Image (cartoon, rainbow, N blue to C red):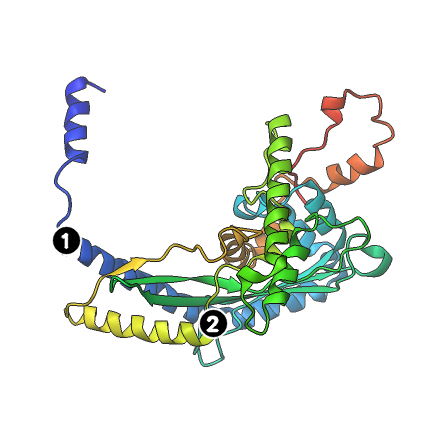
Amino acid sequence: MSTDFGASLLDRLQGSEPTEAQLKKMSFLEEKRSRIDVDCLRDSTLKMHDWYNERDAFVNGNDEIKENFWVRVFANAPSEIDQYIMTPDAAALGSTLTNLKVERFELNEQGQGEPRSIRLTFEFRTGEENPFFENEKLVKELYWRRRSVKNADGKTKSWEGLVSEPVRIQWKKDMDLTKGLLDAACDLAEAEKGGKDRKKLPELEKLKNKIVELETTADQEEDEDEDFPLSPAGASFFAFFGYRGNDVSAEESKVATKQADERFAKLSKGETVEDEEEEEDEEFEDIEVFPDGEQLAIAIADDLWPHALELFNRDEGMDIEELEGDVDDEDEDDGDDEEDARPKKKTKV
């Protein structure tokens, strides 16, 4: 690249900024696109309903496919999901997962309701076939909620996203893959019931201390083994069941949604409305045990669930036999170098 061309490009990139009117128009167009996306999701959910039932009937009607269907699907999960599955998680999912179901549970058969809310139902082997936990099912419900708050300065701040309640896992002795993190999140959520002030609860400090403890341990482990970094969430995949997101009730969200619809209607007519600022999600910033919970839930619902047949039939990167081999051949490998024998921090299911 010549100096003159580089200077010309820099001048263009540093050219005049959009006017305030242009920025408002851009914001309106972005919101319009977002609303179209939601309408498309609503329509596709209704249209795909029977297909999902047909697919599930096919899988469940063929024992040889059903046996390891969802294990193979997760083994070939896209990176948006795979990056959160660490070696112990892979062992748990690979040996116990039997079924997965994704539902847009707030959307009725007439297409009314919120299509972005997601229910994830994981089913597992039980008894001696599951050495990790007692639960036969883990159901994680995530509600799409909106909040709009007017500050003391008169400016309105809004937030929207997925919120949820922690789901407790009944771990078997010494098998808690979250190292007490999920239990601490569940304890706090249960202590808050009845409108108790979170800031005055001892469970709050216990959770904060647990997060600091595990973050410190994780940093030390990552420094020792830079070749295999930890998950972006810095915790087990199963800590996802502790995700909360924000503290927004259904009633509060209903009011904020109505206000947002009225505001958009005015904008569509060319009327002037009050500017809104995006509210930072600070409600659970210090106590969120799985900060990427919303991204993971959406990835499972949008990228894994619809494409399960394709992922099941994809052979690329299938490490199931290798994972089983690592366990079976452990005694034979005792003589190998310690570095070669060290398991990766992240592997396929």
Q: Please identify the residue farthest to the bottom as the structure is shown.
A: 110
Percent coordinates x, y for residue 22 in the rendering: 15, 54
Outermost residue toward the front in this view: 200
Q: Is residue 172 left or right of residue 272?
A: right
- Image location of residue 197, percent across then percent down: 54, 66
Q: Are marks 2 and 1 in contact (CB under 8 Å)?
A: no
- The residue where tag 2 is placed is 249
Of 178 and 92, the residue lying toward us:
178
Q: Quadrant of residue 98?
A: bottom right
Residue at 82% in and 52% down: 173
Q: Position of residue 344 (x, y in %)?
A: 67, 33
From what the image shows, is residue 163 above or below residue 239?
below
| Crowd tier of the residue under label 1, counting other residues whose Cα lies within 10 Å: few below 14, some 14–19, many 20 or above | few
User: At label 2, which amino acid type do we have?
Assistant: Ser
Residue 230 against residue 44 in the figure, above or below? above
Which quadrant would the C terminus be assigned to in this image?
A: top right
Label 2 crowd bin: few (<14), some (14–19), many (20+), radius 10 Å: few
Q: Measuring 51% from the left and 54% from the top, which residue is drawn there?
A: 299
On screen, residue 167 above or below 193 = above
User: In the rendering, at what x and y percent does residue 309 appear?
Assistant: 60, 56
What separation in Å lies between label 2 and label 1 (alpha carbons)?
34 Å
Q: Nearer the viewer, mark 2 or mark 1?
A: 2
Q: Which residue is mark 1?
A: 20
Instruction: Identify residue type, mark 1.
Output: Glu
